[in-house]
Amino acid sequence: MSDLYSNFLAWAQSRFPTVEPKGNEILINSIFTEDGKKKLWCNPSGGKNRVKHGVYHCWKTEKKGTLVSLVMEVDKCTRAKAMETLGIEKTDRPLLEETDFDIQFDDSRSDLDYEKEQKILSFPPYAYEINKSPISYHERAVDYLKARKIPTDDFFVCTAGKYENRIIIPYYNSSKKLVYFNGRFMGNAHPKYKGPEKEIGVGKEDVIYFPRFPDYGDTVFLCEGEFDAYSLHLCGLKGAACGGKNISEKQSIILSNYRIVVCFDADAAGDAARNLAYNRLMQYNRFASDLMEARPPEVTKDWNALYSSYDDKILLGYLHHNIKKAELA
């Protein structure tokens, strides 16, 4: 077998619960299906068309790509790091299918075909950096975030269109590429949050919000909402948000290389969703035995409310005394 085959096999065995070598191919749990039972077929030899750097194919969802792009997504690393992991000699220019993990491709088509079909996520129209926005929206956004003790630097505000009057919260990957955004309405409206249009093909169940991207093995404090995660970030912790109480399989895989402290809201819904979230995380996490939990006090319900009502010292003191081993009911 080739060095790429051996290197990919070793990497897969360190990341996935089920790895099944089968001739020239290696079968692993697909990260594209919710039940985790379907297999991702990985061929380091590149399949019938001998695609450079090998290929993967999820037959359930028809997702395809190179093994380099797969390592980039699972490990949340740069292309150079993924190539190093697989023992591939560095090249100056990535293959087109490696530039975005979600590109579906047919090896018989040209690069021009890929470029035409690739869907690029960008900020919505009329979105401004808050400090460069029209004065009325600037003041509104500053007041909204100030009430939550959140600085404006990392956020945007939309002044017209479908996202008007919303704080735009950007999601970036480890390469600082925009992969998602969430628009929080400044006031009372339904829906309170609004993400990209469905045609983009990325939903909140496909991403994790990190105010700052963690390193391998870091302790990540997983919240429901972005402002809760950002509040923990302001306290010097590695905050993250999953956008709700239901953690998807893909989100679990994104979190698989970190030690997790589950920090869901202090409410009945959080209690009801806890076991499902814990089971999903423990299925994929490399540090599953270290899974911890911490709940904000019922009087504030969530971490941003605790942070904005008091300060970082109070929040950290409370967290220190209330963090514990995750317990499944």
Image (cartoon, grey):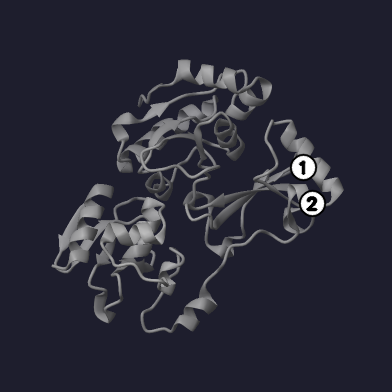
Badge 2 density bin: few <14, some 14–19, many ≥20, Cα 10 Å = some
Q: In the rendered image, is residue 184 in sight?
A: yes
Report the quarter where the N terminus lies.
bottom left
Q: Is residue 82 above or below residue 155?
A: below
Amino acid under label 1? Ala
Circles 2 and 1, Cβ within 8 Å, touching? The answer is yes
Which label number is shown at residue 316?
A: none
Q: In the rendered image, is residue 16 in sight?
A: no
- Residue beneath label 1, please? 141
The residue at the point 52 percent across, 72 percent down is: 118
156 vs 85, left or right, is right
Q: Position of residue 158 (x, y in %)?
A: 75, 53
Q: Quadrant of residue 257?
A: top left
Amino acid under label 2? Ser
Q: Quadrant of residue 43?
A: bottom left
Q: Nearer the viewer, residue 266 or 128?
A: 128
Q: Is residue 307 above or below residue 175?
A: above
Report the quarter where the C terminus lies.
top left
The residue at the point 37 percent across, 48 percent down is: 253
**First in sequence: mark 2 vs mark 1:** 2
* Number of dots carrying numbers: 2
Mark 2 or 1, which is nearer the eye?
2
- The secondary element bearing badge 2 is classed as loop
Q: Nearer the viewer, residue 142 or 87?
A: 87
- The secondary element bearing badge 1 is classed as helix
Q: Is residue 24 above or below residue 71?
A: below
Which label number is shown at residue 133?
A: 2
36 vs 182, left or right, is left
